[in-house]
Amino acid sequence: YSRAAKKGNVLDQKQTLKKLTHIPAKFRNDKASIWMARLAIQEQRWDLVLQAVDSLSTEEQQDGRWIFWRAYAHQQLNQKERAKALFAQIANKATYHGFLAADYLQQPYTALQAEKPNRNAELSQVRELRNLQRALALYEVGYPNLALKEWLFTIKQLDNPHKLAAAEFALQHGQAFTSILTVAKTKDWNAIDLRFPLLHRQLVEQHSQQQQVQAAWVYGVMRRESAFKTDALSRVKAFGLMQLMPATAREVSRSLKLTGLDRKDYVKPAINIQLGSHYLAKMLAKFDGSYPKATAAYNAGPGRIPRWTPDSPQPAEQWVESIPFEETRQYVQAVLTYTIIYDHLLKQGKTHARLSQYLTPIKQ
């Protein structure tokens, strides 16, 4: 089902969508129905989007993504009251589709307005856990793998409130990656204070200002790429906070006239953030200020973006949902979500950006 979308061939996509609609709903599994929905979004066939979403399993239908697209389809079909009711179900969530729903309802991002929870009672209890103390000590003396293993083993036995307290405990000791990983175990996506630390703020603001890109966007990319793990190394050898490929790091170094750098230099936060910010600025300029396209290019490479771009202008939310590579689609949605959250954290008391501001129409 994904082959036609990945090829970017409009005729193939239309034919694939037609074939999928001919399969009775009871014989379509979730994978087929999801591709039917995505192809229908690409073709702006809102009746077929509703058919596809309605044929998903009950569990899949409850995903915020499909609640959003059901609402969006109803809105496009001028069924505005139905759309509003569905948007309202997810508009209070700090997620990509939650923020979009809030934008359509013209509501504030309530998930970002909540005060930091008081976890003092649970925090005092987790501080006494010997295994967590030992894990933090292992981090201190340079055994991060052993430390993380000890930490994850210990938090398995904790309930969610104590897991969140453990995450705060880790963050207090400078272990942002461990904190983020711990919160993920609870699936509490609204734990903003723990999931989105403002590490390396001076470096991020300095280099984003020099490159004339949004500091929140740089943070969004860094948070998605490495979750602030300085020595992160991917399976394709991307490294550091901004997960730069070796060839990209060398190319950007030459552009900035930085000489004599070796691998150890490239993973240093100051260098890695400088190079990553420059490359983001380059992608944003290449794709005419389109944040979705520039973000997708950072993940999948700039060469693929023209093949995914329709001949006529398309709303960005439709284009993002139609990105054929699942990894890149999830990446773009996550980075833009994190960008909004970091914009809020960086601009305390000021006017905050809306997700829709980053979703300008997609053009060739």
Image (cartoon, rainbow, N blue to C red):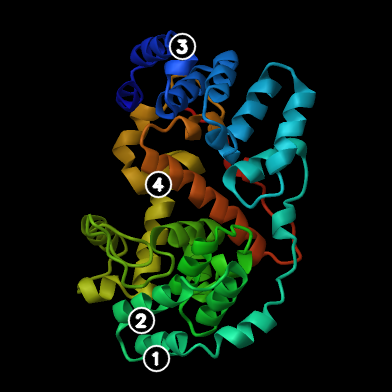
Q: Amino acid under label 4?
A: Met
Which tag is nearer the camera, tag 2 or tag 4? 2
Q: For the residues marked 2 and 4, what is the alpha-carbon distance in whole angstroms?
A: 37 Å
Disc with the residue nearer the chain's start (1 vs 3) = 3
Q: For the residues marked 3 and 4, what is the alpha-carbon distance in whole angstroms?
A: 43 Å
Snapshot quadrant of residue 151: bottom left
182, above or below 65, in the image: below
Q: Which quadrant does the C terminus fall into?
A: top left
Q: Secondary structure at mark 2?
A: helix
Q: Which quadrant does the N terminus fall into?
A: top left
Snapshot quadrant of residue 20: top left
Q: Amino acid under label 3?
A: Pro
**At 46% from the left edge and 11% from the top edge, which residue is drawn?**
24
Disc with the residue nearer the chain's start (3 vs 4) = 3
Residue 294 visible in the shown view: no
Dot 2, how many residues are within 10 Å of its Cα: few (below 14), some (14-19), or many (20+)?
many
Q: Which mark is residue 24?
A: 3
Residue position marked by numbered label 1 in the rendering: 137
Q: Is residue 283 left or right of residue 37?
A: left
Dot 1, how many residues are within 10 Å of its Cα: few (below 14), some (14-19), or many (20+)?
some
Disc with the residue nearer the chain's start (2 vs 4) = 2
Q: Secondary structure at mark 3?
A: loop
Q: Is residue 227 left or right of residue 81?
A: left
Confirm or deny contact between disc 2 and disc 1 (CB under 8 A).
yes
Confirm or deny contact between disc 3 and disc 4 (CB under 8 A).
no
Which tag is nearer the camera, tag 1 or tag 4? 1
Q: For the residues marked 1 and 3, what is the alpha-carbon distance in whole angstroms?
A: 59 Å
Q: Secondary structure at mark 1?
A: helix
Q: Amino acid under label 1?
A: Ala
Residue position marked by numbered label 4 in the rendering: 283
